[in-house]
Image: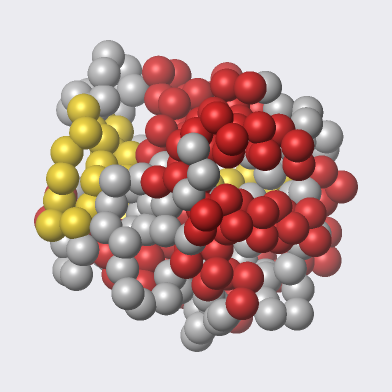
Amino acid sequence: MKMYEKTFFGENSKINFSEGPENGETIILIHALGSSWKSWNPIINLIIKKYHLIAIDLIGHGKSDKVLNDYTWENYSIEVSHFIKFNSPKSVNLLGHSLGGIVAAICSIKEKSVKTLCMEDPPIFINRKIKPNKIFGDFKKQMFLSKKRFNLEYTINEILKFSPSIKREVAMSRAKNILSADYKIWETILFRDIVGTNTPDKILPKIDVPTLIFRADPNLNGVISKDNEKMLSNIKVLEIEYWENCGHNMHSSFPEKFSSRYLSFLNKNRN
């Protein structure tokens, strides 16, 4: 089964998204910083047969519009909330990776149609003082490559220099994402206030839909520490899935395992 790219004209921007057949309840997939809807390809074929999938390119990413405002959590969520209002049935399940998880959480508070929330290693506890060194070091390099707009081959080779363990096809995918993105998406998270008023103490207690959080190993660039995990208990209905020896990109590292756990969560919360 295929996904087909479409365009939605949102509150302030044009949004690119990809949609599959209406095989069941709707799941909206929201990607990580510097990525695109195609980052969900490893799991799409594992869940598309029973669900109606919609995968969005966030503003500043993929084929969606670049904007003049900062790429804050709030500004990302405004466009996604508008998309949900005009494109979703009566109920929708949100699945977000990293930045996408934060955006999904904010939208779950704003939109009454949201039925369940799943966040894959969301960086909800970052602020100007707490930024994971390895991931943010990579962000600086990605911003440089995006800003300079080198050709694809050069960008691939540069990515392989600072991420030598990844395969060339993965580097190619990342290079395409970097070259299509607005460099200001990285500038905002590195040097400006991406969080705004959406701090953990403001967001977490307001989430009242069933929530599943995938937590990656902090020793492998997971962004939620054991101490942080205690704060997640502010979410009313919560399941936490911790994977030791798994890094930040959980759904692409173990697509079958990830999909199985997520589908189990959805089945548990069917009406």
Residue 161 falls left or right of residue 78: right
Count of numbered tags: 0
Query: Which residue is nearer to you in this view: 137 or 27?
Result: 137
Residue 16: where, in percent of width, then height? 24, 46
At x 27% / y 64%, what residue is drawn? 79
Residue 90 falls left or right of residue 166: left
At x 67% / y 70%, what residue is drawn? 125
In the figure, 223 relative to 16: above or below? below
Occupied quadrant, residue 165: top right
At x 34% / y 23%, what residue is drawn? 48
Occupied quadrant, residue 204: bottom right
Residue 7: where, in percent of width, then height? 15, 45
Instruction: For residue 88, say whether it is visible.
Output: yes
Instruction: For residue 30, say whether it is visible.
Output: no
Residue 80: where, in percent of width, then height? 29, 59
In the figure, 8 relative to 22: above or below? below
Q: Quadrant of the N terminus?
A: top left
At x 44% / y 26%, what residue is drawn? 41
Q: Quadrant of the C terminus?
A: top left
